[in-house]
Amino acid sequence: MFEGLLLALSPIYLMYLVIGVFGGIVVGALPGLTATMSTALMVPFTFALDPAAGLVLLGGIYVGAMYADAIPACLVNTPGTAAAVATSFDGYPLTCQGKAQHALIAACFSSLIGAIIGGIALLVLSPPLAALSLRFGPPEYFWITVFALTIIASIAGESFLKGMAGGAIGLFLATIGVGTVGGANRFTFGYTPLQAGVQLIVALIAVFAFPQLIRMLEERYLDAEVEEYTSSKGATRETIGALLRKPVNLIRSSLIGVLIGILPGAGPPVASLVSYNEAKRWDKDPSQYGKGSLHGVAASETANNSSATASIIPLLTLGIPGAPVAAVIYGVLLIHGLRPGAQLYTVHGTIAYTFAWSLLLAGVVTFVLGTLLSKPLGKIVAVPNEILIPVILLLATVGSFALRNSILDVYSLLIIGVFAYLLGKLGFHPGPIALGLILGPIVEGGLVTALAMGRASGMFTVFFTRGLSQIFIVMTVLSVVWTVYSRWKVWQRDVAIGSAQPQ
Amino acid sequence: MSDDTASEQSAASDTTRRPGPVNSDLWSALALFAIGGVALVGLYGRTGDSWIFPRVITYTMLVLGLALLVKAFLRPERLQIWASSQITREVWIFIGGVSVYVLALRFVGFWVASALTCFVLIYLLGPERTSRRALMAFVVSAGTLAFLFLVFRQGFNVPLPESTWF
């Protein structure tokens, strides 16, 4: 382990790390370009490098990109990836208050904390965490995503019914195409290109970016949604000081990220949403969330980054890539003659530990670069809307097309975007729709596979009899009860205020 | 800065919820019935594991639509959709223009369609229509396309929609 640290700190490896992080930040900030895409594109460059150097470069890109998806989320309310959806709930309101720099610094500091704790988990706790991940089966995946769906209540905004409906619409959109279980063509109505379904990134750009473009158009006649950006000299100190006043939020979010990150297929999007919900639930003043709370940004980004690092644990210890980027890294390991699994730590321990340390150090580099870039990036909001609108439109178009080189994705962007805009006008929040899109495939896979397990064993109680499932069932029930109780209290307060006002 | 002040400016980021004459619950219910109706057509005669989850979601949407319909008559949420007819007109012109752009991608290609769209939007959305504005629109459009070319085409080798006409 110590040898790996020394190697990771050597000047040449640090140079690869900085290049990787910088490249990851540039790519991650462009909606539609994912960490997976940028990592995959860099793979050929690693052929000329030794295995450890190649992994350090890719690790830097991964961590940089996992922070950078917060940049468009905060500045223009367009999450760069699914993992930044929860970041936009408070990041963009902060920008609207003229505090774009604070939002970006909160994101990169939280990313640092997440990367450190995720890195420590990877270095020290890999074997027991890997063993825990093996205990998760379809019933556990089903219940953990049902628990995650209860988040809808906290992000639904004013109308709980519309929040639920938005979640249902997102879940429905996620079912279009070939079913993950069974393989039937669903809701394609004979149109073959729809068999590939609605791409998640395209749908997220459509749900967030397109309505945002039209709102910017409307702003020319209304009170400005975004206050003038004001650069603040003490922004870094202020922001970090505010976040450190609630250390429990940072630690809890990191741990949630690690625990969810080790689950193949769950990963940063689920971790950031669950963490955001828990941060809001346990805060003394939850009403701040959704209105520009630094702690909301911190909860999402900390979990996002710790889960990204933790998703490497099942890859290195069990040879199971838990996330798309992990699958790319799996390929790189094979190309260099390294077999992921338990023996990686014994036969090629230095390489494994160098990679693990580089993920932790990448968090530090991301924090430094992110802080330096926060001021110039924050000035983007000062660009006139008539320039931002077409530029964002072009970026959204390119980002949508680049995923599969399919014009259908651009058509989907337009159709879903207009629909999401009109739903927004009717009072729907985009968060629940995004939540449904992200969680749909996971909850369906868990449900249908667990039903098949029940059918095979003749006992449908498989949903309720496994220990881990029972824990998530209790958490789900408590979450629902808490939601109902909180809404009832708000309703009672509103009734009391209404009756106290003079007639 | 105190993070306690964050809640004071909540209205600034929520321009979608202004009180008005439109019964948003009624229209929301109709939207859910429309989506649910399409889904029911797709579900008709289908059985098997692939259809369990879509069926559950479809029925959920229809039940929620019904709940919103009841609320629409008992305690409707009335919202303003567009603040003025000028905004309404501009929004639909914008949506129409973007639709033309998206459809044109296949015929004239990404670069031509995007150059024209970018130029037209910057010129028309600006506060004044002058030759200086036109020059600025040209410069910004050219710069944006150059950036996209360098990053996506040269850097990432991402092919973009090509023209079928030329």
Image: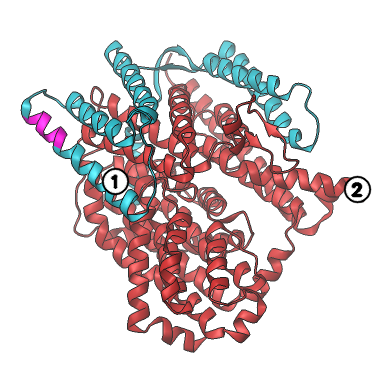
Chain colours: A red, B cyan
**Residue at mark 2:** A459
Q: Is residue A74 left or right of residue A478?
A: left
Q: Secondary structure at mark 2?
A: loop
For the point 17% across and 27% down, the residue is B123
Label 2 Cα crowd, 10 Å radius (few <14 / some 14-19 / many 20+): few
Chain ID of residue with mark 1: B
Residue B46 location (% of width, % of height): 78, 27
For the point 31% across and 17% down, the residue is B93
Give the camera-side residue of A233 and B105. Answer: B105
Give the camera-side residue of B52 and B5. Answer: B52
**Taken as a whole, is the magenta stretch helix, strand or loop?**
helix
Q: Is residue A438 left or right of residue A114?
A: right
| Quadrant of image for the C terminus of chain B | top left
For the point 74% across and 63% down, the residue is A135
Outermost residue, front side: B166
Say which amino acid is labelled 1.
Answer: Leu
Q: CA distance from mark 1 to mark 2?
A: 56 Å
Are the residues flagged by discs 1 and 2 from a single subunit?
no
Which stretch appears magenta? B132-138
Outermost residue, bottom side: A3
Label 1 Cα crowd, 10 Å radius (few <14 / some 14-19 / many 20+): some
Give the camera-side residue of A75 and A472. Answer: A75
Say which amino acid is labelled 2.
Answer: Met
Residue B56 location (% of width, % of height): 72, 31
**Residue at mark 1:** B148
Visible residue check, residue A464 = yes
For the point 61% across and 54% down, the residue is A266
In the rendered view, tell whether residue A157 sits above or below residue A334: above
Q: Secondary structure at mark 1?
A: helix
